[in-house]
Amino acid sequence: LPEAHQRASRLRAALEQRGVDEAVLAFCRAELLQDNYFHAVLEATKSVASKLRALTGLTSDGADLVKDALRVSGAPDELRV
């Protein structure tokens, strides 16, 4: 247990130093502690989509979610995401 606590503390310090948002960490904490970095990135990505939905009220996912969330109202089509 002490070894796991030390490892978790080092990981948290490294992520905080890099400016990782606490909300992102909440989504992928378990995967990071298991050194499962592929799934940690996947979960972190899900957290961004979840945050976009929460901020915009949209229900879409993936590219459609990002496109709709970042759309600039009244902008010409070529300037829209």
Image (tube, rainbow, N blue to C red):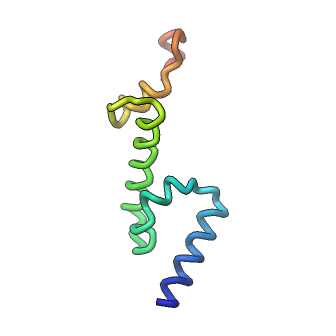
Name the spot of residue 7 as percent of width and height, x first: 53, 81
Residue 11, percent across and down?
56, 72
Residue beneath the point at 46% across and 44% down: 48
Q: Residue lying at the far right in this picture: please name it.
A: 17
Q: Is residue 26 left or right of residue 19?
A: left
Q: Is residue 16 left or right of residue 34?
A: right
User: As displayed, is residue 81 above or below residue 50?
Assistant: above
Q: Residue at image x 43%, y 49%?
A: 47
Q: Position of residue 6 (x, y in %)?
A: 56, 84
Which residue is at the front of the view, 3 or 41? Answer: 3
Establish if 2 lies above or below 41.
below
State the image quarter where residue 37 is shown: bottom left
Q: How many marks?
A: 0
Residue plotted at (58% across, 56% down) = 20
Q: Seen in the image, is 46 located left or right of residue 19?
A: left
Residue at the far left: name it: 60
Name the spot of residue 18 as percent of width and height, x first. Answer: 64, 59
